[in-house]
Image (spheres, helix red, strand yellow):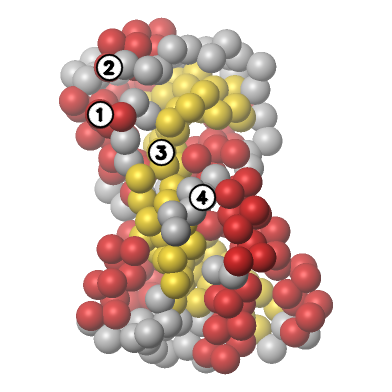
């Protein structure tokens, strides 16, 4: 039995932490694809198999309204904020204010972030760069990738220590070789609620419901928090 998941990168660490135990308990194999939420939505709408979907709450609500996700199956996982990262062991720049961010980015040799067209964090971070007046000035230092995970892995392998990146906190926290400096200043804060649900065309809806129950359960609260989700009762 196979269970196919399409998910934003924010939930990759959470799902992968529970994958082996769930597979052993249910005699199944989980196949997860984790990338920009916009790309995952498009995969679903173009007919790719999906038994469990994890995207931003706003996208999930829209898919319920369009009939692509089963009503009543939505469960919130938690809020994920967007943060700033540096290579492990590098000095942490000040990022508390607009002026701090401008100075830090101007001092960076490279700036790594996810797709500014399809990824939640990438879209938002590029708007921050525009607001700071750096989108043209520093354009030759930008390195963009399909999702935050690939962006952070590339940054970890980059030559030189003076590089910075931005993506969702969950993706920063589970990437080896990367340190979380902190979240964006309040004026630029992006706090995104993530939710899961079962698509209308799911092949294994009952099994998907069991995994959904585990992911959103009280027992995983500590795991979700350590993965970078903020829980709001």
Within 10 Å of disc 3 (Cα), the crowding (few <14, some 14-19, many 20+) is many
Cα separation between marks 3 and 2: 15 Å
Please tell me whether mark 2 or mark 1 is closer to you in this view.
1
Give left or right: position of 109 versus 30: left
Q: Give the SS element for disc 2.
A: helix
- State the image coordinates of residue 101 (x, y, percent, origin top left): 34, 16
Residue 211's place in the image compared with 120, above or below, is: below
Q: Residue at x 66, y 29 (%)?
A: 177
- State the image coordinates of residue 222 (x, y, percent, origin top left): 64, 53
Cα separation between marks 4 and 2: 25 Å
Q: Residue at x 48, y 48 (%)?
A: 230
**In which quadrant is the N terminus drawn?**
bottom right
Q: Residue at x 43, y 31 (%)?
A: 183
- State the image coordinates of residue 166 (x, y, percent, origin top left): 43, 32
Within 10 Å of disc 1 (Cα), the crowding (few <14, some 14-19, many 20+) is few
Residue picked out by circle 3: 82
Question: Closer to the camera, 11 or 229?
Answer: 229
Cα separation between marks 3 and 1: 12 Å
Q: Mark 3 vs mark 2: which is more N-terminal?
A: 3
Cα separation between marks 1 and 4: 20 Å
Which mark, by number, is residue 187? 1
- State the image coordinates of residue 212 (x, y, percent, origin top left): 55, 76
Q: Mark 2 vs mark 1: which is more N-terminal?
A: 2
Give left or right: position of 53 versus 138: right
Q: Are marks 2 and 1 in contact (CB under 8 Å)?
A: yes
Which mark, by number, is residue 229? 4
Q: Mark 4 vs mark 3: which is more N-terminal?
A: 3
Residue picked out by circle 2: 98
Cα separation between marks 2 and 1: 8 Å
Residue 85's place in the image compared with 215, above or below, is: above
Please tell me whether mark 4 or mark 2 is closer to you in this view.
4
């Amino acid at each position: 039995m196979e269970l196919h998941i399409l998910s934003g990168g924010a939930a990759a660490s959470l799902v992968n932490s529970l994958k082996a135990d769930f597979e052993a308990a249910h005699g199944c194999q989980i196949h997860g694809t984790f990338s920009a939420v916009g790309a995952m939505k498009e995969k679903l709408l173009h007919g790719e198999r999906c038994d469990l979907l994890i995207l931003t709450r706003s996208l999930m609500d829209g898919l319920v309204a369009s009939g692509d996700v089963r009503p009543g199956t939505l469960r919130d996982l938690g809020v994920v904020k967007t943060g700033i990262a540096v290579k492990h062991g590098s000095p942490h720049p000040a990022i508390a204010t607009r002026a701090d961010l401008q100075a830090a980015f101007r001092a960076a040799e490279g700036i790594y972030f996810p797709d500014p067209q399809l990824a939640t964090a990438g879209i938002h971070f590029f708007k921050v760069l525009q607001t700071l007046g750096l989108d043209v000035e520093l354009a030759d230092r930008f390195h963009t990738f399909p999702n935050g995970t690939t962006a952070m892995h590339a940054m970890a392998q980059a030559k030189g220590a003076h590089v910075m990146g931005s993506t969702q906190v969950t993706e920063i926290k589970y990437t080896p070789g990367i340190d979380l400096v902190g979240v964006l200043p309040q004026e630029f804060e992006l706090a995104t609620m993530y939710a899961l649900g079962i698509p209308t065309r799911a092949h294994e809806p009952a099994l998907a419901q069991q995994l959904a129950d585990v992911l959103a359960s009280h027992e995983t609260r500590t795991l979700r928090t350590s993965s970078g989700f903020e829980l709001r009762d």
